[in-house]
Amino acid sequence: MAEDSGLGAGDVTFAIVFIVGAVLLGMAHFTFVSFSCIGDTSQCAQSTEKNGYYEGTLHYLDGRPYRSAEFEAVFASRGEDNPVTFETDANGYACIRWAEERVYPKPRAPTGELLVGDEPGSELAPFHELSFFGLPEGCQESSEGVPWNHADDAESTWQNWLLFLLPLASIGLLATTLVARRDDRALRLFAAGGLLFGANLIAFLVLWFV
């Protein structure tokens, strides 16, 4: 009986609640990952890996070269509100290392004015995979990247593995706690399992919604 064990009746109840919560979080994560790039895939990159580059000469809409100036590249995987900043050279040329997206990135000036590529109405040039020789000279790379849950390979990211392993570890510890509830170590196991459940909940909310 719980009152004769290392755990009180309330602790046993909380352990069961935490186990159910961890199961639900694991199922929610699995569902979100499975459907994140199904249907309209235009907002998903083909990988989180920056395995190629886009390049081109940028112009204002009236045809003037956009020389030696910062510009924002709007990637579908990051959305309109999270552009990445790069810079053109003295000729208006830009080369940016990135992952392959299904929609070409749209360049714009920091003021919001749209820019075009080598031909009027075009976006930044098509994607080029990295060759044996690497990136063209002067190609830029940002510390920003494709959001892990907006890529076809989301299942292989550390974020996915974290949200897969945390609930399993929490469930394992809490289940052991219930089995060994009369043991003197039960309270320590319960505390560890509860901490893992809390870490899982926080990680789930941050990685999916922040």
Image (spheres, rainbow, N blue to C red):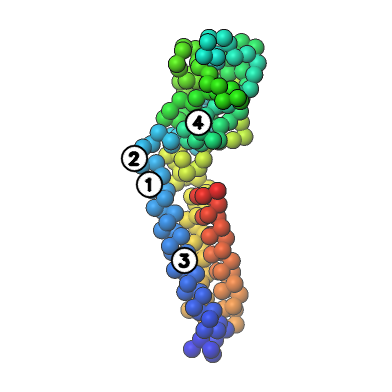
Q: Nearer the viewer, residue 163 or 85?
A: 85
Q: Quadrant of residue 184?
A: bottom right
- Residue at disc 2, secondary structure: loop
Separation of residues labelled 1 and 2 (CA atoms): 8 Å
The first of marks 3 and 2 along the sequence is: 3
Q: Are marks 3 and 2 in contact (CB under 8 Å)?
A: no
Look at mark 2 in the image and give the residue it sits on: 39
Q: Are marks 3 and 4 in contact (CB under 8 Å)?
A: no
The first of marks 4 and 2 along the sequence is: 2
Which kind of residue does numbered mark 1 sit on?
Phe
Q: Position of residue 154 (x, y in %)?
A: 46, 44
Separation of residues labelled 3 and 4 (CA atoms): 35 Å
Look at mark 3 in the image and give the residue it sits on: 21
Separation of residues labelled 3 and 2 (CA atoms): 29 Å
Count of number-bearing discs: 4
Q: Position of residue 179 (x, y in %)?
A: 48, 79
Look at mark 1 in the image and give the residue it sits on: 35
Q: Position of residue 51 (x, y in %)?
A: 51, 30
The first of marks 1 and 3 along the sequence is: 3
Tell me the residue at 53%/54% (across/down).
205
Tell me the residue at 61%/18% (across/down).
88
Q: Nearer the viewer, residue 115 or 173?
A: 115
Which kind of residue does numbered mark 3 sit on?
Gly
